[in-house]
């Protein structure tokens, strides 16, 4: 089990052992929550909010985020954009806008156009890093703060960075209209700003490909274009 703790001044990732898991799950977790206070670390006396992720219907995750309220994040609406440019000599490009009206936990509305693609499906992912000094090649794996395996946007197990596929028409244009429940534009463990958005050559098998690489990147192939997700204004 992975437990994330955030407060007004810091975000700490705690990987806790099985004994602590037993203490914090089930009835113990309920007691912890109802006390409404946190003890022994900065933020003592503040209210707690505990949420399980991924928040998918009929799926009980063993990953929890524990927030000390008030949140240590900017809770005003946030808008970010990724301007994608082609890897190498390619002609793939586009703009994708991310809007989160209620950070850090509200859904993200994703809208954009990507042009210059071969007709068909292409993977769309957020990578761990946003360092474009070597193009789209050195961006780490898919953004995966919960150490889960690769999947699709609606899989119970997925990387936060898994946006599945986009589909280009014969004219090379792919339109993106999505709502994602897991990403965040605020700081914190699910924050995507400063990371890279990447469109790939092949189709993403969403973790269903039946081989080891399917659990890593969905066999989606080389990056065609990438851009850093950055705040607007
Ligand atoms: Zn992935």
Image (cartoon, rainbow, N blue to C red):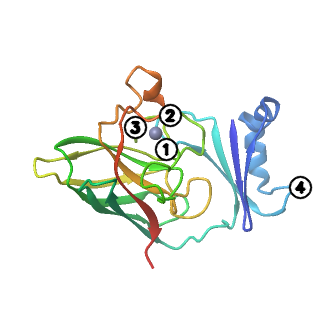
Q: Nearer the viewer, residue 96 or 6?
A: 96
* Residue to which mark 1 is pinned: 142
Residue 99: x and y, percent? 41, 65
Residue 55: x and y, percent? 51, 43
The quarter of the picture where the C terminus appears is: bottom left
* Residue to which mark 4 is pinned: 40
Residue in the picture at 59% in, 46% down: 145
SS category of the residue bearing label 2? loop
Residue 2: x and y, percent? 68, 40
* Cα separation between marks 2 and 1: 13 Å
Q: Which mark is residue 157?
A: 2
Q: Is residue 167 left or right of residue 206?
A: left
Question: In the rendered view, would you say 208 is above or below 61?
Answer: above
Residue in the picture at 35% in, 58% down: 110
Residue in the picture at 40% in, 42% down: 153
* Cα separation between marks 4 and 2: 33 Å
């Amino acid at each position: 089990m992975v437990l994330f703790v955030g407060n007004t001044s810091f975000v700490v990732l705690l990987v806790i052992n099985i004994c602590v898991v037993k203490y914090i799950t089930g009835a113990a977790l309920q007691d912890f929550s109802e006390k409404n206070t946190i003890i022994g670390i900065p933020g003592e006396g503040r209210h707690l909010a505990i949420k399980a992720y991924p928040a998918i219907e009929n799926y009980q995750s063993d990953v929890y985020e524990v927030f000390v309220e008030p949140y240590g994040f900017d809770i005003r609406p946030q808008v970010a954009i990724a301007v994608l440019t082609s890897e190498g000599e390619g002609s793939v490009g586009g703009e994708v806008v991310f809007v989160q009206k209620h950070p850090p936990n509200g859904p993200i509305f994703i809208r954009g156009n990507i042009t210059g693609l071969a007709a068909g499906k292409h993977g769309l992912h957020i990578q761990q890093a946003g360092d474009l000094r070597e193009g789209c090649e050195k961006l780490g794996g898919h953004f995966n703060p919960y150490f889960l395996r690769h999947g699709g946007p609606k899989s119970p197990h997925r990387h936060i960075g898994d946006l599945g596929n986009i589909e280009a028409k014969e004219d090379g244009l792919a339109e993106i209209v999505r709502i994602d429940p897991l990403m965040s534009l605020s700081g914190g463990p699910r924050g995507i700003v400063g990371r890279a958005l990447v469109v790939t050559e092949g189709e993403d098998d969403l973790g269903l490909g039946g081989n080891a690489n399917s659990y890593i990147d969905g066999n989606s192939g080389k990056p065609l274009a990438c851009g850093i997700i950055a705040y607007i204004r």
